Image (tube, rainbow, N blue to C red):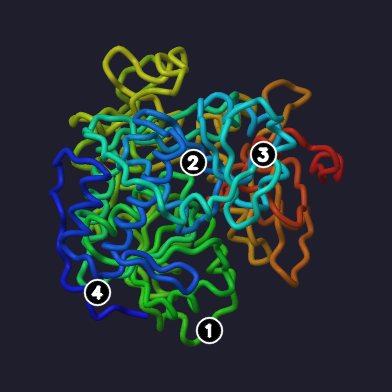
Amino acid sequence: MRSAAQGPLSYVGALGQQTTVPEILQLRAEATPDAVFVRFEGQQVTFGEALARAEDAAAALSAIGVRRGDTIALMLGNSLAFLDLWFGAALIGAVLVPVNTHLRGEGLRYIVEHCDAAVAVLDAELVEPFEAAVPAGVGPAQLYVHGGEAGGRWSSLAELLAGGHPPATRAVVKPGDLASVLYTSGTTGLPKGVMSSQNAYAAAAFEYAQRYVRMRSDDVLYTCLPLFHINAQSISAMPSLLSGRPWVMDTRFSGSRFFEQMRAHGATVFNYIGAMLTILLKQPERPDDAQNPIRLATGSSAPAELWREFERRFGVLLVEIYGLTESAGVALASPPDDVRVGKCGIPVSWAEVQIQRADGSEASPAEPGEFVIRSTQPNTMFQGYYKNPDATAASTDERGWFHSGDRGARADDGYFRFIDRLKDSIRRRGENISSYEVERVVNSHPAVAESAALGVPSELGEEEVMIVVVARDGHELDPAELVAFCAERIAAFMLPRYVALRAELPKTPTQKVQKFALREAGATGAWDRLTAG
C-alpha cells in the first residue's frame, strides 16, 4: 500500500542542527501534511494527522493536570496510541517514561514508583500484572487502560482521547530539555533511568537517515522492535518524520512470515537484532528468497560467519551500527559503501569513541578493552540516570568518557569490533573467553537454532563454560557430538563443559537473551563433559 501523495524525499532540518521532537513534528506536518507517516495493522496516519492526533493527546493530558516536566508512564505495546501520547506529551513539555511490557513484580513496581509518574497508561492485558505488582496507593494516581473497559481505579484511554478538551498551550521546548526516561534492563542491579534530551532523538535519526541508510525517495522503513526502547523511536519513527518517508510499525517478529510481510508492505529498510538474522537464515530456503523489496538492513551483532550468506540469499546489504540508550541509540556505524564484515563501524559525526584499558589508557589497535564514548556536540549523550547521581558519577569519568560496559577492539583500519558485554566475558583458568565467540561456533552447527554461552561457577575457582542450546525444528542434538563439533573449531580452553538443551531462550522484546536468568538456573541438570567421559 503506497501513497501517491508521498512526494520526493525532503528533510526538515539538517545534520548537527539542534532541534526538538515538537519542532520536527510541526515542520514535517507543514511540509507534507498528506503524505503517509505510519502504517499499522491496516491503518495509516499522515503527517498532518499525526500532528492533529498529538494535539488532541496534548489537550487530553493537559485536561487531567499533566504539566511541563511531569513524567508519564506508558506500558504499551506498539500502537498508534503510543505515538499519540509520546508526541502529545512532547508538545506540552512532559516527559515520556516507556515501560517494558514484559516487566512483572518488583522490577515493575520499582520503575513505576521511581519515575514519579502521576499518570500511567497500560494495555488492557497488562492491568492484572500491574495491579499484582503495584497496589492501590502506590505509584501513579491516575491510571488509564488502552484497548479495554474502564473499571475500579482504571479510566478509559479511548474516552480521554475522544476529544472535547480545550486546546493545550504548547510549551516552549528547547533542545536540551528532558524528553524521556528509558529504564535499562537492570540485569546487574536495580534498573537505571536513562535521561535523554529532545535533541538526542534528532541527532541519532539524522545520522541514521542521511549518512548510513542514505534515505531514498522510494524508501519505506519497517520495524517490529518495541517502541518502549530507543531503537524503534530513534531509527524508525524519527527518521520518518525527518525525511518524509513512511514507516511500517509491527507488533512482533516472525521468522516464517518476515519476508512475506516485507513484500506486502513494500518495505525497503528494516532494523535488526543479530538473533533475527540467524533465525531468518534457519528458515527453509525458497527460490524467491532474494525477490523482496528490501535493499538494506541496519542493526547490531550480525554474526560474521553468516553475514555474506545472508546478503547473498536475501539480496540485502547489512549495515552494522553500535550504540546504547545512553548514546541516543548509536555511536558507531558502517558507511554503506564501505561495510566491513564482523565490524560495527566508525564513530558517527558527533561521537568520540575509544577502546580503553582498565586503567583508563587507550588500548593499542586489536587490543581488547572497554568501549568508552563522549560527544562533541551538546544535548546528544544522555543527561545522567534519573534520581541516581551515584550511578551517573560511576558511569562517566573526569574526562567526560562514558563507560559502556561493553568489550571491543579497534582495528588498524579504524573500524571497531564488538566482542562482548564485560559481564558476559567468561574467566576460565586465567583465560578471558568471549561468550560471543563460543556462540558463533555453536550456532554454525546445522542442528542448532540458537544458543547462549555463559560462565558458571567452577569447583576450581573462576568459571566453567556452559552453553544453552535450542535445536532447530525437526532436529535432535547430542551434547557429546556438539562438543566434538566445537572442539574442531575453537581453542580447547573455550570448549563448553556443560550443555543444556532448552525449548527456547529467555529473551527481551528486542530479542536479546536474558543471560541473568540462565545464570540463576546454573548448570543444574545440564550434560557435563567431564562426568560423561
Q: Mark 2 against mark 3, which lies toward the viewer?
A: 3
The residue that disc 3 covers is 153
Residue positioned 44% across, 33% down in the render: 65
The residue that disc 4 covers is 218
Which quadrant of the figure contains the N terminus? Answer: bottom left
The residue that disc 1 covers is 286
Q: Mark 1 against mark 4, which lies toward the viewer?
A: 4
Query: In front: 127, or 377?
Result: 127
Q: Is residue 439 visible?
A: no
Q: Position of residue 291 (x, y in %)?
A: 40, 83
- Badge 1: few (under 14), some or many (20 or more) residues near its Cα, within 10 Å? few
Query: In front: 128, or 455?
Result: 128
Q: Position of residue 103 (x, y in %)?
A: 64, 40
- Badge 3: few (under 14), some or many (20 or more) residues near its Cα, within 10 Å? few
Disc 2 element = strand
Q: As drawn, is 275 to the left or to the right of 235?
A: right
Query: In front: 399, or 362?
Result: 399
**Amino acid under label 3?**
Arg
Q: In 3D space, how far apart are the residues under numbered discs 1 and 2 (Cα atoms)?
A: 39 Å
The residue that disc 2 covers is 98
Q: Position of residue 414 (x, y in %)?
A: 24, 41
Could you tell which of marks 3 and 4 lies nearer the N-terminus?
A: 3
Disc 1 element = loop
**Amino acid under label 1?**
Arg
